[in-house]
Image (cartoon, rainbow, N blue to C red):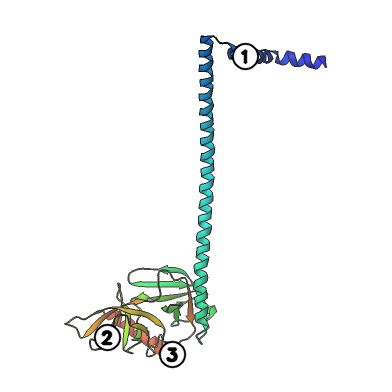
């Protein structure tokens, strides 16, 4: 035991003596009432308190900074999760409406999702993830729960491309649901308009426009939009009627392709006619 103590003393005696002297000095300073000693004691304790507070502030600032960084990371992750849940909720509502629509229509439907959009002034087109293997053919109407989206015009094995309502190459025979007045729907690069409507026709702002049974492209009465303005130019015998589509083409993601073509030959004839008319214009 004495040997262990001796080894410990020989190894740390300088540190032990230093600690004893420091403790003795502190004891002497604490119990000495001399004015000079009091001043030294006050300065020493003030300096110790200052540096102690400084170290504490630096440590606290570092801890708070790290905690804030963790909270920001957590908030970012929660934001992404909330947005993902909102996306799922919106898609769920859209799919429920589509399923409700499907149960009310006797024609077979092909479900599809929009995988890409080409949006420009003249020719808006969508690419869908359903093609020949799913039974999709050119000329089939594409809808969602709000109304007509467009028409399929080219198909591959697993994908199809549609011309939307906002495509100058697509023209559809439509009619006023209230007055039964027929017209041609087209996209002029800026607006959806109805052509070939005489000024004497019974049409009003707010009238619903649906596809006409006279159309060889969309013979079903599918909702398209409603009239928002009627321009009566004195130099023209026809009205320029502007409509707003029910379906929001910029946000649509899920659609149904109606598995029907009224007449392939007549359908091609009408499409070719519109192509020739567009090239002439």
- The image quadrant where one finds the N terminus is top right
Q: Position of residue 177 (x, y in %)?
A: 36, 87
Which disc, if any, is residue 53?
none
| Nearest the eye: 68 or 258 | 68
- Image-quadrant location for residue 34: top right
**Residue, disc 1:** 27
| Nearest the eye: 229 or 115 | 229
Separation (CA) of disc 1 from disc 2: 109 Å
Q: Position of residue 13 (x, y in %)?
A: 70, 13
**Residue, disc 2:** 196
| Nearest the eye: 223 or 262 | 223
Give the structural element (helix, strand or loop) at label 2. strand
Q: Position of residue 27 (x, y in %)?
A: 62, 14
**Residue, disc 3:** 263
Residue 130 appearing in the image: no
Dot 3 or dot 1: first in sequence order is 1
- Image-quadrant location for residue 121: bottom left
**Which class describes the residues within 10 Å of circle 3: few (<14), some (14-19), or many (20+)?**
few
**Which class describes the residues within 10 Å of circle 1: few (<14), some (14-19), or many (20+)?**
few
Give the structural element (helix, strand or loop) at label 1. helix
| Nearest the eye: 281 or 33 | 33
- The image quadrant where one finds the C terminus is bottom left
Residue 266 appearing in the image: yes
Q: Residue at x 49, y 84 (%)?
A: 259
- Image-quadrant location for residue 15: top right
Residue 201 located left or right of residue 148: left
Q: Residue at x 53, y 62 (%)?
A: 85
Asked if 222 appears above or below 57 in the picture, the reply is below
Q: Residue furthest right?
A: 1
Q: Residue at x 81, y 14 (%)?
A: 3
């Amino acid at each position: 035991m004495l040997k262990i103590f001796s080894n410990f003393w020989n190894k740390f005696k300088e540190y032990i003596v230093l600690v004893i002297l420091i403790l003795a000095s502190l004891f002497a300073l604490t119990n000495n009432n001399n004015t000079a000693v009091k001043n030294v004691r006050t300065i020493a304790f003030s300096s110790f308190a200052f540096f102690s507070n400084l170290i504490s502030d630096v440590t606290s600032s570092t801890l708070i900074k790290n905690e804030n960084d963790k909270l920001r990371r957590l908030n970012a992750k929660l934001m992404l999760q909330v947005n993902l849940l909102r996306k799922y909720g919106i898609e769920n509502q859209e799919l429920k409406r589509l399923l409700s629509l499907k149960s009310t229509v006797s024609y077979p439907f092909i479900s599809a999702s929009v995988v890409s959009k080409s949006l420009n002034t003249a020719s808006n087109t969508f690419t869908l993830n359903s093609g020949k293997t799913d039974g999709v053919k050119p000329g089939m109407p594409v809808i969602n729960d709000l109304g007509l989206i467009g028409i399929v015009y080219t198909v591959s094995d697993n994908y199809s491309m549609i011309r939307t309502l906002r495509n100058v190459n697509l023209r559809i025979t439509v009619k006023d649901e209230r007055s039964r007045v027929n017209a041609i729907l087209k996209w002029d690069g800026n607006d959806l308009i109805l052509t070939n409507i005489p000024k004497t026709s019974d049409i009003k702002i707010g009238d619903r426009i649906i596809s006409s049974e006279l159309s060889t492209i969309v013979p079903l009465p599918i909702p398209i939009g409603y009239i928002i303005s009627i321009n009566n130019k004195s130099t023209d015998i026809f009205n320029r009627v502007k409509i707003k589509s029910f379906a929001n083409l910029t946000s649509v993601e899920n659609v149904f392709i109606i598995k029907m073509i009224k007449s392939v030959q007549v359908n091609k004839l009408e499409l070719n006619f519109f192509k020739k008319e567009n090239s002439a214009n």
